[in-house]
Image: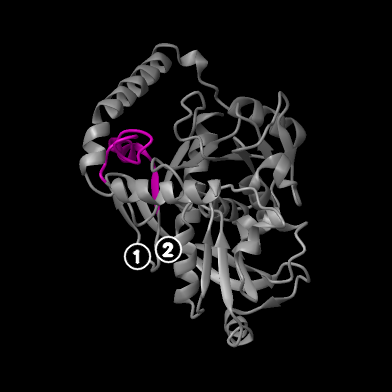
């Protein structure tokens, strides 16, 4: 019941934030207070730059200013893949949403426990094979990561755009079709900080259904990212089917889908677009804890889930579960060359 209420509230807020209606207007005074607090905070760091941590290797921060899910985690994996293609050794840091970390960062690679690391860091580690360090203190996370994995030569920060205490060399904002919505900060709008922040980053990655030609405006690279459906994997057996074979496999079976991500409806829409007929859907809050009874709310013979949710289902013995595995594809073929040039500039400046 609580999960359903949270999901309905999220959907309601998102709809309110798409325009400047009565709700946004009534929340404007609170948003002005938020803007003042943010401005004071930034001014303090300008007055005391010694409080800003500068890592010994280049740092790429990937975040968003729209609260909630915009496709940030797939973008992190796409950037990590681009770095690996450049023969770089990236490491990823994350705050670890919704888990207790303690004084010491959680660090590892490969198959990680999402209850210890968080669902997104665990998925990044599994899909990319790079080391991951999780802690609310980005400085501590980086220092621990470099001590354990000295071969790491570039840090990718999963989120942290608003973490002013961390110096960064490249900033990437990820957004989706909602863009900046009504353009106001919370609670009158969905933004974590002023809309003008988007004019100060290096790259804007927009999750889209179709690739759009990359462009550059005022020195800001603008590219699109598609989540290409690669295959379906049966969670219990590990058997995989191509999208076409999976559609054929379930054509005479009742089909449902569940998603505990920032925008479950986008996941459901993508499945329908691929040719699947969903008779039931189960939207869940982002980072929702999954239990063996979670999927009992669906009565279908087959249930499709996301890779992010699958990380948390390894101990759930439900033969109905299939994972829709996607691969992020960036529209800019020269993105790797651009990254290489940026990183080379860092090396030259620090010699």
Where is 70 relative to 301, above or below?
Answer: above
Which is more N-terminal, label 2 or label 1?
A: 1
Asked if labels 2 and 1 touch by Cβ distance under 8 angstroms, the answer is: yes
Q: Position of residue 317 (x, y in %)?
A: 77, 63
* Residue at mark 1: 212
- Residue shown at the point (23%, 48%) measured from the top left: 19
Considering the numbered disc 1 on the image, is that residue within a helix, a strand or a loop?
loop
Q: Magenta residues: mostly which secondary structure?
A: loop
Which coloring applies here? one colour
Considering the numbered disc 2 on the image, is that residue within a helix, a strand or a loop?
loop
Q: Position of residue 59 (x, y in %)?
A: 54, 36
- Inspect this view and state whether residue 333 appears: no
Q: Is residue 85 magenta?
A: no
Judge from the rendering whether residue 172 lies leftward or rightward of residue 102; answer left or right. left
- Residue shown at the point (42%, 63%) measured from the top left: 331
Q: Is residue 197 magenta?
A: yes
Q: Quadrant of residue 36?
A: top left
* Mark drawn on residue 184: none
Q: CA distance from mark 1 to mark 2?
A: 7 Å
Question: How many residues crowd around disc 1 within 10 Å: few (fewer than 14), some, or many (20 or more)?
Answer: some
* Residue at mark 2: 331
> Of all residues shown, which one is farthest toward the top?
47
The foreground one among 24 and 270 is 24
Q: Quadrant of residue 28?
A: top left
Find the magenta span and give its range.
182-205
Q: Position of residue 213 (x, y in %)?
A: 34, 64
């Amino acid at each position: 019941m609580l999960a359903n209420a949270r999901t309905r509230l999220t959907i309601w807020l998102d709809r309110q934030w798409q325009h400047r209606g009565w709700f946004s207007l009534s929340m404007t005074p609170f948003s002005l207070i938020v803007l003042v607090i943010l401005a004071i905070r930034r001014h303090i760091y300008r007055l005391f730059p010694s409080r800003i941590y500068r890592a010994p290797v280049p740092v790429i921060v990937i975040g968003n200013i729209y609260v909630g899910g915009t496709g940030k985690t797939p973008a992190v994996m796409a950037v990590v893949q681009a770095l690996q293609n450049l023969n770089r050794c990236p490491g990823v840091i994350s705050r670890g949403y919704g888990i207790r970390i303690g004084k010491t960062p959680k660090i590892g690679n490969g198959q990680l426990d999402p209850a210890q690391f968080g669902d997104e860091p665990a998925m990044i580690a599994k899909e990319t094979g790079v080391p991951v360090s999780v802690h609310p203190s980005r400085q501590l996370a980086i220092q621990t990561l470099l001590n354990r994995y000295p071969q790491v030569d570039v840090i990718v920060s999963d989120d942290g755009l608003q973490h002013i205490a961390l110096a960064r060399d490249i900033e990437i904002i990820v957004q989706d079709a909602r863009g900046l919505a009504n353009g106001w900060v919370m609670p009158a709008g969905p933004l974590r900080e002023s809309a003008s922040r988007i004019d100060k980053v290096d790259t804007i990655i927009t999750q889209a259904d179709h690739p759009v030609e990359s462009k550059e405006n005022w020195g800001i690279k603008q590219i699109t990212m598609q989540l290409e459906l690669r295959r379906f994997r049966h969670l219990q057996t590990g058997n995989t089917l191509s999208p076409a074979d999976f559609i054929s496999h379930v054509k005479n079976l009742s089909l449902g889908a569940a998603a505990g991500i920032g925008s479950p409806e986008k996941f459901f829409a993508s499945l329908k677009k691929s040719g699947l007929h969903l008779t039931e859907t189960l939207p869940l809050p982002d980072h929702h804890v999954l239990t063996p009874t979670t999927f009992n709310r669906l009565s279908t013979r087959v249930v499709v889930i996301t890779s992010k949710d699958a990380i948390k289902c390894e101990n759930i013995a439900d033969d109905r579960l299939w994972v829709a595995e996607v691969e992020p594809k960036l529209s800019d073929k020269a993105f790797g060359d651009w990254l290489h040039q940026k990183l080379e500039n860092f090396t030259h400046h620090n010699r």
